[in-house]
Image: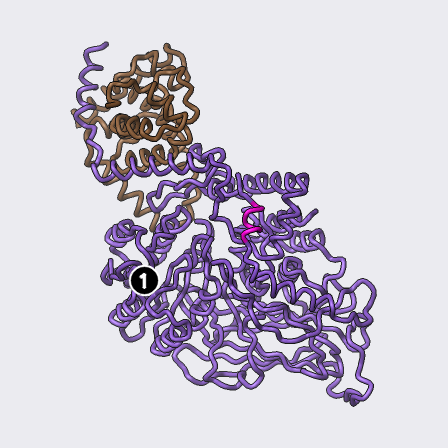
Amino acid sequence: MTDDLDDLRAAMRAATPDADAATRAAHLALAQKNFEMLQESRDPTRPISDGSKTGLWTGVKTMLNTFTSRAALTATTAIVAVAFVALTPMRDVLIPTQGPQFERAPAVPSQERDRVADAMAPIAGEPRAEILFAEDEADVAPAASRLSKTLAAPAPSAAEGYAIAPVPQPDVALRPEADTEAFANADSNPLQITEESPVSTFSIDVDTVSYSVLRNSLMQGYLPTAEMVRIEELVNYFPYDYAAPDGNVPFQPTVSVSQTPWNPDTQLVHIGIQGALPDVADRPPLNLVFLIDTSGSMDQANKLPLLKQSFALMLGQLRDEDQVAIVTYAGSAGQVLEPTAASDRQTIMAALNRLDAGGSTAGQAGLQQAYATAAAMAAEGEVSRVILATDGDFNVGLSDPSALKDFIADKRDSGTYLSVLGFGRGNLDDATMQALAQNGNGQAAYIDTLAEAQKVLVDQLTGALFPIANDVKIQVEFNPATVAEYRLIGYETRALRREDFNNDKVDAGDIGAGHAVTALYEITPVGSPAQLSDPLRYGAAPEAGSGDELGFLRLRYKTPGSDTSNLIETAITTDLPAQADTGFAMAIAGFGQLLRGGTYLGNWGYDAAIDLATANKGVDAYGYRTEAIQLMRLAQSLSAQ
Amino acid sequence: MRMDVSDEDLAVAAARGDRAAFSVLVERSYDRMFGLAFRLTGSRAEAEDLTQDICAALPAKIARFGGKARFTTWLYRVVVNAAHDRRRRFASHARAADGWGTWEIARREADAETAEQVDWLVHAMRGLSDDLRDTLALVLDDMTHAQAAEILNISEGTVSWRISEAKKRLKATRMKEDQA
């Protein structure tokens, strides 16, 4: 028996290759690094920083959480339970069972990686109090003064049970930026009195960053701060079953009016826009330039390695005639992959895998080089797009933000689009991401898991890369004879001036192939007990004009490549047919308002939002809605004190 | 200077937080880990990935090395468990990948091609069931049947049976190929 076994042994020894020296060294270094991180983390005073740096409100809430150990325990249990329910099969025995977040081995691109671990690792041993105390005093002061302003606002008479908004002043100023995570947001849209300002104008928004950031926060056990929540991005994260356009129009709006879930005396005007989805085979060839941040801060499992995996997923969606180039910025900007046919996956993957995080972010020419590369690749009838992937270091060469925006806007007009993908947390510069993507006619998305990469870069890739309508603006004029008050839910950062609607030079959001966009107005009919403002004593009585129209919807858009806009108009009436699939959007809008501390919701809370979402889950082929309901439950647990 | 210290002593010191001991120990064990990883997976790329996973997780695991077992036995168990886990992940990944279409299929075909180029024995081992392959890999790595049994948490008799079964299969594969 032993003889042939010895033969096998010898054969095996001959067949076993020696470990590659470079790989070996890298692995040893990784082991040593993790060992040291583990030792350091045993020192209990060291804060772990990958979690979001919280704003004032969450800070206060988490402090209460921390000090109320029972509430904290409940929340923690819920997080663990949800993490396991949500992320079922990919369990990894190599998960460190507790302690700090490890550097995770970067994987071959196709692998589903330790999603459970990534979701769970930050939970263990998160020091909450430190983060709160680290709040800059300068940061607290203005927020506190705003708080006092809110409290000082006189409470006008109100229908019982409905709280009052602070005096509506378009207070657009952002909080001073003390931590390195900056979120673009503004105060919630105030209630408008139809008689005084009947017209509401805004740009559509197909970004989804806010939802992913919210999910990431909740999974880490924090309620997101109000400024992290942009309601329209939560609502627009989900595909809806809206009527698809027929004929040659790029999209079709459908409007319906229904009962507001959180207020029996108001109504919701639901504007759903469904973009056409051209046949994939018909789409023009695509030139993609990945502009990748390889600064030292990208050297974390949920950043560069996730980015590589995400792009690998996306490569599978490209067709042979598409081209890909890679430019990095950090230390020295450089083109690491010349324009390469998408069919040559090996070369592209090899270039991606060679990327290494290191150095500071100061690539002077990164962005310029990316655009130059894109310009060189462009040919008649092709679509060119720069995809910027970063964790928040936007030193892409132009340090002046407005110069950067101008540069991107200029390039946009020359036909190259820009999309922004955010990775990781800690110094995520959401505000800049938003600004760049908006100016580049692109989408901003935040990739926190491989599943999210799958959604953004695989399931919805066509929409993300192929615009079907540019500069889409919405203007609604309400009829003072029927609508006493109205309020736009979300879109705070997308407000446009009334006169900008007809000005084709003013940039606005874009709709990609197959995108669904939803806008919700809560309206208070004339004579409703829910009316919050008293009629003016000296105002003219509203003319009982055009009968039962609630308002009039105008939509402007440009077809890609065109400079002049088209107009779509439709009246909003009470007898519009009910639209499919509105309930879930309402539930999400309500959820967003709960997280923002909405003042219009009365006693309507997480329970009602969860019930409404569950009842309207529909087919949910990709499971996005199921996940949202779990997040709602998690937020409910975290907010219970 | 620490080259004459036993693996077990180094591991106990590393478990207490001695970085130098950990460093020497991993350096010393790396080739063995890689070799076993190669035998278990049958491909260099996968072996490298597996070894990387293990290196990343080893610091946390070593803290639980109690000094009761032989270090090599303990380490091999870590490697075998990591390999099991990786396979399980691949299996669920393969299921999840069903809908991914052409790109994933192309990737798998590329994998299959590389497999053809490796040594006959390695390739033939890939044809064995996971149980047989793991057992054979350990025994070919100079583990006694008793040690392999301890690592795999099965009885020594089962090890012996699996080895003779694996040899039979390999022989059959060889004969089939020789005739062809």
Query: Which chain is indicated by disc 1?
Result: A
Asked if residue A469 is positioned above or below residue B158 in the image, the reply reads: below
> Drawn colour of chain A?
purple
Residue type, numbered disc 1: Ala
Label 1 crowd bin: few (<14), some (14–19), many (20+), radius 10 Å:
many
Q: Which residue is mark 1?
A: A362
Measured as percent of width and height from the top left, residue A396 is found at: 34, 65
Whether residue A429 is visible, yes or no, is yes
Q: On the image, which quarter does residue A342 sit in? A: bottom left
Left or right of B109: which side holds A132? right
Q: On the image, which quarter does residue B8 sit in? A: top left
Left or right of A578: which side holds A392? left
- Which chain is depicted brown? B
Measured as percent of width and height from the top left, residue A457 is found at: 41, 57
Q: On the image, which quarter does residue A505 sit in? A: bottom left
Asked whether residue A632 is drawn in magenta, I would say no
At horizontal 48% and vertical 33% (from top left) the residue drawn is A97
Asked if residue B114 is positioned above or below residue B147 in the image, the reply reads: below
At horizontal 71% and vertical 64% (from top left) the residue drawn is A599
Q: Nearer the viewer, residue A158 or B122?
A: A158
Measured as percent of width and height from the top left, residue A80 is found at: 57, 39
At horizontal 42% and vertical 59% (from top left) the residue drawn is A392
- The secondary structure that dominates the magenta segment is helix
Q: How many marks?
A: 1
Left or right of A505: which side holds B109? left
Magenta extent = A128-134
Quadrant housing the N terminus of chain A: top left
Asked whether residue A133 is drawn in magenta, I would say yes
At horizontal 38% and vertical 68% (from top left) the residue drawn is A418
Q: Nearer the viewer, residue A529 or A175?
A: A175
